[in-house]
Image (cartoon, rainbow, N blue to C red):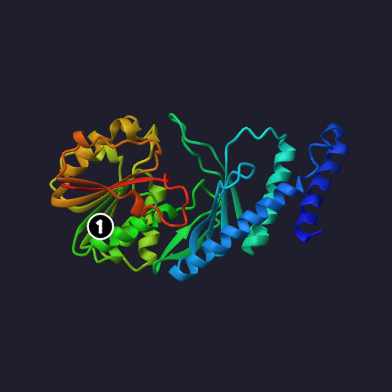
Amino acid sequence: MRKSRCFIKNIFQRRFKRLLLAGKKEYFQILIPDTAKFDAFRNRLSKVYRHIGKWARKQDISCFRVYDDDMPDFPLAIDRYESIAHVSEYARPHGMEPDEHAAWLDGCIDVISEVLDISPELIYMKFRQRQSGLQQYERFGRTNSEYIVRENGLRFVIKPADYLDVGLFLDHRNTRKMVMEEARGKQVLNLFAYTGSFSVYAAAGGAAGTLTVDMSNTYLQWADRNMTLNDFTGDEHRFLQADVLQWLRQPTGERFDLIVLDPPTFSNSKRMYGTLDVQRDHVALLDMVLRLCRPGGTVFFSTNYRKFKLDEEGIRATSIQDISKQTVPADFRNERIHKCFKIKK
């Protein structure tokens, strides 16, 4: 019997002993591991990791998606960030009791540790629900666990234990590079900036200046750290804590050549002026953003709402290009991970 299979079996045996002590003999059959399913998961993960890992090494990419809901019995998204793995379990009606589910998760972590050659202590497991309505994600815990990772020669702080996401969205790796390639000599505005990765890329591309706007002071401080980590510390790189919707409604004489707009799908934050629904509000939102754009300027607009449909007729722009196929990286086999548009004023 393989070492990993023994490990999984031992996990279930330990949990069964605890249930026996608690007088729950009826769970015995439930807690017998289905080693065939775990073997299939190991085989699939090994296959995709060999392929994606080889591609990543050739591209000099050290942070990439390994596995994304490939098998119905293992609905996971597995991302490698250099020395760690970040794993999200998608919500599903799995029918398992809590202790059985915990044992299943332990088995998954063992397989991931074996295939990716990462210690279980460096595998961060999260539970991800499909976002709907006004549901929003919450902070998981304050552990102060953080790492510095590299992407295209730039460095970023990630915090895999604190939030649902680590601070660097891998599906926008290509989009960030596009922004960098267009930023030279331009004034760049980054809205709903999160941890400021687009601002870092714009600065690396030779932007004349950047303005990073987000409602969260925590994320702005994180963005400032990312800029400082890459030696972009001049006065030309500014940060503004503001409700983006309210700020866009205020008159300003400042104009920008390049704007990045990556809003949340939904937001009903108590600090926000009203609510935001990207499908309902994107025309009005883009109209306000284009007012801040110089003639001939560019807006990179993105959303991860998978049912999103752009109302091109309602947007006052000289050209609109759907660049989703170019912006979704090769390690994301789900091409619907986001929608991205390049809009010219």
Based on the displayed image, in which of its 4 quarters is residue 198 positioned?
Answer: bottom left
Q: Quadrant of the N terminus?
A: bottom right
Pinpoint residue 183: horizontal percent, then vertical percent: 24, 61
Q: Nearer the viewer, residue 329 or 89?
A: 329
159 vs 149: above or below: above
252 vs 1: above or below: above
Question: What amino acid does circle 1 point to?
Answer: Thr
107 vs 288: above or below: below
Please tell me which residue is depicted at 85% across the width and 35% down the height of the picture. Answer: 22
Disc 1 is placed on an element classified as: strand
Pinpoint residue 37: horizontal percent, then vertical percent: 71, 47
Q: Nearer the viewer, residue 123 or 170?
A: 170
Based on the displayed image, in which of its 4 quarters is residue 74 positioned?
Answer: top right
Along the horizontal axis of the image, is 254 left or right of 222? left
Pinpoint residue 144: horizontal percent, then vertical percent: 54, 55
| Camera sees residue 276 | yes
Please tell me which residue is depicted at 43% across the width and 68% down the height of the picture. Answer: 59
Along the horizontal axis of the image, is 49 left or right of 219? right
Based on the displayed image, in which of its 4 quarters is residue 307 positioned?
Answer: top left
Pinpoint residue 238: horizontal percent, then vertical percent: 27, 56
Along the horizontal axis of the image, is 249 left or right of 118? left
Please tell me which residue is depicted at 42% across the width and 49% down the height of the picture. Answer: 218
Which residue has dot 1 on it?
A: 210
Q: Nearer the viewer, residue 72 or 268?
A: 72
So how many labels did they put on this image?
Answer: 1
Along the horizontal axis of the image, is 23 left or right of 309? right
Query: How many C-alpha atoms fall within 10 Å of the one at disc 1: few (<14), some, or many (≥20)?
Result: many
| Camera sees residue 169 | no
